[in-house]
Image (cartoon, rainbow, N blue to C red):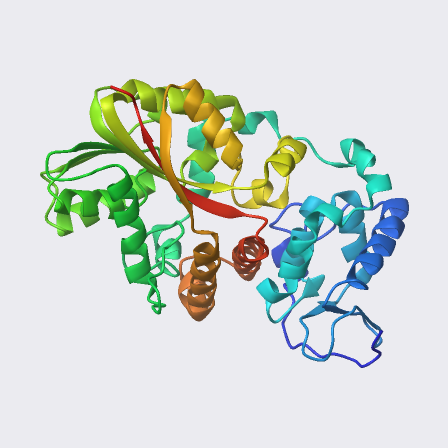
Amino acid sequence: MATASIQDTTLLPDTERLLRWPGLAIPDESPTRAWLAERLFRRTVRRLPVRAAFPGGEVVGAGGPGSPVMRIVRPVTFFHRLGIDAKIGFGEAYMAGDWTSRDLADLLTPFAERITTLVPRALQPLRRWVDAARPTDERNTVEGARTNIHRHYDLSNEMFESFLDDSMTYSSAWFPAGCDDLHAAQLRKIDGILDLAGVDADTHVLEIGSGWGALAIRAARRGARVTTLTISPEQRTLAEQRIKEAGVADRVQVLLRDYRDAQGQYDAVVSVEMIEAVGDEYWPTYFATIARLLRPGGRVGLQAITMPHDRMLATRRSHTWIHKYVFPGGQLLSVPAVLDNAAAAGLDVTDRHSLGSHYARTLRHWHDRFAANADRVAAAGFDPTFRRMWEFYLAYCEAGFRAGYLDVWQFAMTRPA
């Protein structure tokens, strides 16, 4: 254990601003849970290559002088938040300024690498009484999905422009060997999905989840006809503008429509990181809809973020910080869940490959761009608490991919003729 004092000049959000974020300024309290949370936290960091620096100079952790530092600014509120609900409180404590770090992803990665053992086995059965259940109003019904998507994708096109590349692609890139150009890597990823789906000049493509139009534009430039679906009005407006500016509006139709309401027959169906917003209740419907819309012999290109199957089963009903602040209604699949649901819908998986390490690099690019454009984000109306929230989200995800806890796959599927 080190004893040197560690300084950090990060400014804390003020109380008046936090009052606009329910629960952040004045957290719930539970002395017993806070006591237990502190002991579990200290036990954990003593085994990690990090340092937790407390007021007064105490430093706990197995990390050496160059290891990531977590500066605990307000220990009392920090441990109360952890004790009440660690899956939400840890991120909220960062948003509120109870703790801070100069390199979040480096700090969070060792935690992500040991996520299954952070809570001692003897205490794991207590989770059923501690973990918050997912709100029933976040179910991904047709109306619920619109509300959930609105809370994320309709935040502000300007905010998303602040950290995405020129293609406005909000999913994992695929970096060519020896190249760290994010834009080139995003185009390579899109081409990979289109290739898996066999998209060419004779193809009528259905895209489930328009994003801001990058994939539709790329497919149209191959000569394909594209019907693309979104339930985000903000995305649809900018996607149509970008499609028109790209000169392919005659080949692309953007519909404000839920995937369950789609009609027609298509040669190919593509969907990039939209399935994470479907929810396990509707996974069978999602795959059955793809099979219904795909002509016999047609092909599918699907990109999906995954987690280990056992962890998916253990956490599928948990309400986490990501759900509360970033992706309400979101749920990751496992590879077996993709394979099983595809098979049940009559789709054959013919190819797949992992891009997990590429997502870690993508997220680092996004984090650096977001930080560099902090003034632009502020000008778009987002306060420092939101910016800390978004920084934590990007770093939290990067750590998950760096640790291998999260992965992302491209799948090729066919509907037998």
Where does residue 124 sit, x and y in percent of width and height?
80, 38
The residue depicted at 21 percent of the width and 20 percent of the height is 264
Q: Is residue 188 left or right of residue 359?
A: left
Q: Is residue 387 left or right of residue 229?
A: right
Vertical position of residue 348 compared to residue 384: above or below? above
Where does residue 222 sit, x and y in percent of width and height?
13, 45
The residue depicted at 78 percent of the width and 43 percent of the height is 84
The residue depicted at 30 percent of the width and 61 percent of the height is 183
Residue furthest front as drawn: 350
Q: Is residue 123 left or right of residue 201?
A: right
Q: In the rendered image, is residue 208 in sight?
A: no
Where does residue 397 sit, x and y in percent of width and height?
54, 53
> Which of the 4 image quadrants contains residue 63?
bottom right
Where does residue 72 sit, x and y in percent of width and height?
75, 66
User: Which quadrant is home to the N terminus?
Assistant: bottom right
User: Which quadrant is home to the C terminus?
Assistant: top left
Q: In the rendered image, is residue 189 in sight?
A: yes
Q: Nearer the viewer, residue 227 or 354?
A: 354
The residue depicted at 77 percent of the width and 63 percent of the height is 74
Q: Nearer the viewer, residue 243 or 154?
A: 243
> Which of the 4 image quadrants contains residue 197?
top left
Q: Nearer the viewer, residue 281 or 130?
A: 281
Tally of numbered discs: 0
